[in-house]
Image (cartoon, helix red, strand yellow):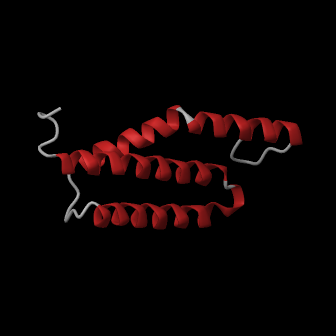
Amino acid sequence: MNLFFESSGQAVCFLCMTPVGMFIAFCLDTDVIAGKLRVFADLFLLLAAGVAVLFMLVLCKENDLRLYHFLGFATGAVLYVGGFGKIIRTLKRQQDSKNGWRNKYHQKG
């Protein structure tokens, strides 16, 4: 692990960026589900992503983004898409089929 992280501060920042990646992936999921409110969901996604990354940089006392920040962010996004994201999308599909409702974004054609 010493080869990857120069100091323990970098490891802490990497681990702090992982939940940020999960949060932004969740926001992206809500953007897909939003339907007619997609414009507002896009704005929310941009604002949430910026605030979350800025908050984590201030919390970790970092001055700039480095590779380990992006790796932590990507790790969180992959964990969300492979785990909770699948569950949420499955529940959404079951809810839509149960209600018999399909919007234009979910239709095949």
The one nearer the camera, 48 or 37, is 48
- Residue 9 in the image, given as x and y percentages of width and height: 20, 51
The one nearer the camera, 7 or 47, is 7
Image quadrant where one finds the C terminus: top right
Q: Please report the residue visible at 20 percent of the width from the left and 62 percent of the height from the top.
A: 64
The one nearer the camera, 100 or 92, is 92
- Residue 36 in the image, given as x and y percentages of width and height: 71, 60
Location of residue 107 with respect to 54 vertically, above or below? above
100 relative position to 4: left or right: right
Q: Is residue 107 visible?
A: no
Q: Residue furthest front?
A: 8
29 relative position to 98: left or right: left
Residue 37: image quadrant is bottom right
45 relative position to 97: left or right: left
The one nearer the camera, 101 or 80, is 80
- Residue 63 in the image, given as x and y percentages of width and height: 19, 65
Q: Which residue lies furthest to the right in this view?
A: 99
Q: Can residue 32 be seen in this view?
A: yes
- Residue 49 in the image, given as x and y percentages of width and height: 43, 60
Image quadrant where one finds the N terminus: top left
Q: Please report the residue visible at 20 percent of the width from the left and 52 percent of the height from the top.
A: 66
Q: Please report the residue visible at 86 percent of the width from the left and 37 percent of the height from the top.
A: 98
Location of residue 89 with respect to 14 vertically, above or below? above
Q: Please report the residue visible at 24 percent of the width from the left and 44 percent of the height from the top.
A: 11
Numbered label tally: 0
